[in-house]
Amino acid sequence: MKVTERMLVDMCRRINGDKLRCWDSGLKVERRGEKYVVMRHYRKSQNGRPSCLDLYRGSAREVKAFIDGFAHAAELANNGAVRGVEDLKS
């Protein structure tokens, strides 16, 4: 199946509204020439920190794999944070 720019943008939108909802940043995809770039885009800019950082650059298929992996890692981090809070309550 061909990976399109629209698919990548939709993946980021879905992940930003779900797994990264409580984070201070989200993912954004941009096409630059023949490659795609995944950026970490901060929701609120702060002094001394850029508004976005390039995380990964590659083909559409490579970027899709990166976004899938990032989403999985974010889910694990979110679950670990919840478990940590529950352990503190015990």
Image (tube, rainbow, N blue to C red):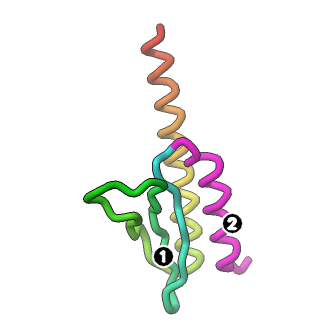
Residue 32 locus on image (x, y percent): 49, 86
Quadrant of the drawing holding the N terminus: bottom right
Helix, strand or loop at mark 1: strand
Q: Which residue is mark 1?
A: 37
Quarter location, residue 31: bottom right
Q: Nearer the viewer, residue 57 or 16?
A: 16
Residue 10, numbered circle: 2
Quarter location, residue 67: bottom right
Give me the residue at 47% from left, 31% from top: 81
Residue 46 locus on image (x, y percent): 34, 54
Q: Which residues are magenta?
A: 1-22
Q: CA distance from mark 2 to mark 1?
A: 15 Å
Q: Is residue 52 left or right of residue 38?
A: left
Give me the residue at 59% from left, 69% from top: 64
Give me the residue at 61% from left, 62% from top: 12
Q: Is residue 78 magenta?
A: no
Give me the residue at 47% from left, 39% from top: 77
Q: Nearer the viewer, residue 28 or 68?
A: 28
Quarter location, residue 2: bottom right
- Crowd band around label 1 with a 10 angstrom C-alpha radius: few (<14), some (14–19), many (20+): some
**Do the CB atoms of the residues marked 2 and 1 lie less than 8 Å apart?**
no
Q: Is residue 64 left or right of residue 47?
A: right
Q: Amino acid at mark 1?
A: Val
Q: Amino acid at mark 2?
A: Asp
Residue 23 locus on image (x, y percent): 49, 45
> As drawn, which residue projects farthest toward the bottom?
33
Q: Is residue 17 magenta?
A: yes
